[in-house]
Amino acid sequence: MTNKTLTFKEYLSKKLLPYKIALPISLSILTALFAAYAILVFYSENDRSFVRAIAPHISTLVETQDGPELQRFITSVAEEKNVILNITKNKEIIASSSDNTLIGKPYHLDGIKVLGIESGLSTQYIVSKTEIKRDGGPLTSKGTIYLLNPTLDLFSMVLGVAIIVFLLSFILLNVLATKIISTAQKSIEPIKDLEKSIYDLKKFGEVNLEGYLRIEELENIYNAILTTNSQLKISNNHLAESKGRELAVEAYKKLIHDLHTPVAALKQMIKVINKDGISEDKKDFAKHRVAEIAEQILFQVKASKGNLKVEINPNDLNINESVKKAAGQAQMAMADYENIEIVERYESILTNVAHDNMMLGRAISNLVVNAIEASKNIVEVAVQKLEKEISISVSDDGDGIQEEMVSLFLQGRGKSKKKNGLGIGLSSANHIVRLHGGKIIYRKSHLGGACFDIRLQG
């Protein structure tokens, strides 16, 4: 599952989510704990001050053993303060503002001590206590005053403070996060401007940040990209010139190679015309072929303009006739190979096929010339109809080619073993066939050598 690309606003919202939720919760808890601690301190000090204030009067009532007045006093004070007062002597309750049945029973309550708070904490009360004594009274009365302040009110107050703090924190932090997102959104507008400038590098100008703060880092990025782009353009021009020269050299090599066959054929036709003892019909045919071959040579030389850009002009023509003419031209060019037999096989059912007879003939001539040079005794040229394709195969009985080298030859990167050979005949033929929408297939020939099979859509 791929991660969704977020806008900058969505990205900020996602990143600030902990601050919008977790932070208010954490802050409210901390504030509640602090408030609880502060309230405990306040209650503890307040209660202890109050107990110390009433201790002298209670001491007098205990000394005079005025039990009813003592009970009335602590009950009145406890109701006014909403607390519980228990008075002990010798660790037994002698008066209680909450439950008279406790009188005479043992009593001791300290509670849990909290750092910084002198009062103790029980599950229900804040426990504040002091000894029963007064100035000028007995040094010790062995009595204690217990003030129990219920914690329910304390917890209610703490909960209320926590809720208020949470709501305020949540609202304020959300407003702050929204403000941050809005500010951040505005802050990336120069980046958007930089992005537009980078996409528009062809205009080559200084970065335009009008209406925004000029940001040095953004300008440095833009200028670095601008400089790099300029250097790349210069390098690309140099590379294009170098590649152009390389292509021109390769193209002229192909031109020279492909002119070899028609020039050689032209030479043979001229010999026929000038040779004594040749019938007039054969001389007329030779004269006609001289004109055709000369036209082909002129076309190939003309194509050299523009780095020998090869184009085809397909017409519905008889494919058998085109192949016969190309094979015949190759035979004439290779007339010195008198011991090589050329066998031609054509299917009579073939109809016209869209092709450029001159360019396709050039490709076929290259294959036939290569086959004659590689052959020992026989070369076969065959044209047949397959299911949806036309097959033009050129086979020989030579030594064949290593299959791993075929693709290199078809791409023009193979090295020919022939004397003075450039090894580019196959690449030229392959290029022409591909312009026709076809392909060249290599396989081992049934004659024992190589077979190159041109496949065209039929």
Image (cartoon, helix red, strand yellow):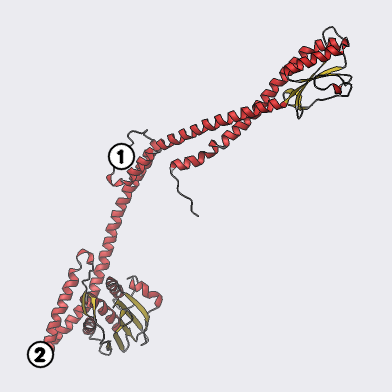
Residue 139 image position (x, y, % from top left) = 87, 11
How many numbered discs?
A: 2
Per the rendering, the mark at residue 280 is 2
Q: Which mark is residue 206?
A: 1
Looking at numbered disc 2 in the image, what kind of residue is underneath it? Glu
How packed mark 1 is, by other alpha carbons closer than 10 Å (few <14, some 14-19, many 20 or more), is few
Q: Quadrant of the C terminus?
A: bottom left
Query: Quick one: label 2 or label 1, which is nearer the N terminus?
Result: 1
* Horizontal relation, residue 394 to residue 299: left or right: right
Residue at (56, 31) in percent of width and height: 167
- Using the rendered image of the protein, determine whether residue 2 is visible from the camera's viewpoint: yes
Horizontal and vertical percent for residue 328? 22, 84
Q: Name the side, left or right, on which 325 lies relative to 161.
A: left
Q: Quadrant of residue 434?
A: bottom left
Q: Secondary structure at mark 2?
A: helix
Image coords of residue 307 (percent x, y): 23, 64
> Going by the picture, which residue comes out furthest to the top?
136
Which x, y percent locates residue 340? 28, 89
Q: Is residue 132 visible?
A: no
Q: Nearer the viewer, residue 164 or 84?
A: 84
Q: Secondary structure at mark 1?
A: loop
Q: Is residue 405 left or right of residue 419?
A: right
Amino acid under label 1? Glu
